[in-house]
Image: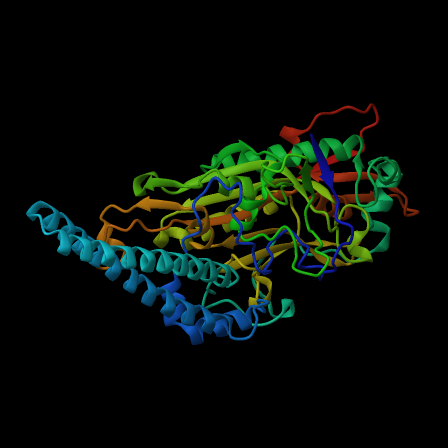
Amino acid sequence: MWSLSVPRRLFSLSSRKLGLGLYSTQVPPTSTANSTLPLPRLDYRALAENITSKTKNSLLRKAPLPPGAISKVAETYTDYKYVLSTLNSKRNTRAIVGERIRVSASSGDNEGKQAALEEAKIIKEAISQLENELSQLEAQLLTLALAIPNDTHPDTPIGPPSAAVTLATGGPDPIPADPKRDHVEICKHFGLLDLESAATVSGSSWYFLMNEAALLENALINYALALAIRNGFTPVTTPDVVRSDIASRCGFQPRDNADSPASQVYHLETNCSSAPELILSGTSEIPLAGMFANRIYNSADLPRKLVGLGHAFRAEAGARGADTRGLYRVHQFTKVELFSVTSGEASEQMMDEMMELQKRILLGLNLPFRVLDMPTEELGASAYRKFDMEVWMPGRASWGEVSSLSNCTDFQARRLHIRYRPHRLHETSGMMSTTLPFAHTLNGTAAAVPRLIIALLENGVQFSDNGVPIGLCLPTALRPFWIDTREKNIIQWVS
């Protein structure tokens, strides 16, 4: 029997940390109990040979690593190689001694056989001890290396959120900020949102969408899906429940490391001790990435492009103030997610392609938007590079994030074992190799529905001469996906 576990305390993060991107740089758990996947395969050699650059990268990303963590990886890796070499030598010696036992037995040399047996016993004990030591070193390496974030794109700005660089703008010019355009008040006037009943049913930061707002959600979903499908993305509906292990391998840490662990997600508890730890998915990126786990693809079959429809659940709804008002930061919302698996050399081109699709979606909605190249402190654990798209919300008097786009290179693939066969294996390293390279993964938001509703309401509300809301202007791009229900229609379609 399953039950839903809600965290007893919620830890506070900055407003952007609790935005649409859901990564944590907390140290991931290394336990793979009940996991169906092999252990993550990380590049310890690269870490050990690049201590200075890896340490600098972690500092620039504000990764919560203990002092000397990466040096400790290098030290442990050196010990690991020494023990492995010694173990292999002992195994080779065991084979030689075994051959001596066989020869002595066949020749009737009992004394020689007994001496070889005694030596074999000592070697067996040494091998057992070395194997145990090697296993411990492997566990230490994994624990240390899993906490280290991905590398960073050389063009990524350095610093806090304020260091973000605007790459592009689009849509109409922003209209002046106006408190009368607050989406909560608009919704009250037209009967579009019921927060009071939701508080009774579920608690704060939950909601009922009503009337045109409910129709708008479905129109936005189908609009985003239609554009993604036209651009070669395969539609998928994703499960809302995922294994905690899969979330961790994607770079999202379900629990923090405080003395009384808090959680960003809802955990499903069971009285069966052998059952896997399950959570409500914080983003459909997690189950989409899991679809590719422990698989090998031919390079001719890449890229793989999916557009997933699912719900995002956030146990931590955010900081106090404007961010928690209305629909901006809630515990559950519908999200259309783009996900792609590419070869190593194709991920940056795919990132450009996905960004163009995201821009096309916002252009069709006739919203003022800007594209930001996010700085190092905003990348989380997985992203090599991350773009955010913000739209102008005049009722909130601010820009609000409505989508993000991350190139995770092979960070997730190494943890999930997503690999591919190049046309020629040696092309990946400049030399002949039988090792299959890890794929690159990318994820991006096609539609975070509640925030798009905010932007459309606050930019599209129409007022009478005395300042009373009388209607809503919505973009004609949504018209094919709309269902008319009211006798008195408050919607006006504009191009």
Residue at coordinates 32% horizontally, 60% vertically from top-left? 126
**In the picture, which quadrant includes the C terminus?**
top right
Up the image or down, 51 lies above or below 328; here it is: below
Instruction: Give the left or right position of residue 26, taking residue 249 as reference.
Output: right
Q: Is residue 34 visible?
A: yes
Residue 42 position by quadrant = bottom left
> Residue 61: percent from the left, percent from the top?
56, 68
> Residue 418: percent from the left, percent from the top?
40, 45
**In the picture, which quadrant includes the N terminus?**
top right
Residue farthest toward the right in the current orientation of the protein: 466
Q: Nearer the viewer, residue 44 or 395?
A: 44
Instruction: Give the left or right position of residue 385, taking residue 433 as reference.
Output: right
> Residue 389: percent from the left, percent from the top?
61, 54
Residue farthest toward the front in the current orientation of the protein: 111
Instruction: Give the left or right position of residue 226, taking residue 468 as reference.
Output: left
> Residue 277: percent from the left, percent from the top?
61, 41
Residue at coordinates 55% horizontally, 44% vertically from top-left? 286
Instruction: Give the left or right position of residue 227, taking residue 109 as reference.
Output: right
Residue 471 position by quadrant = top right
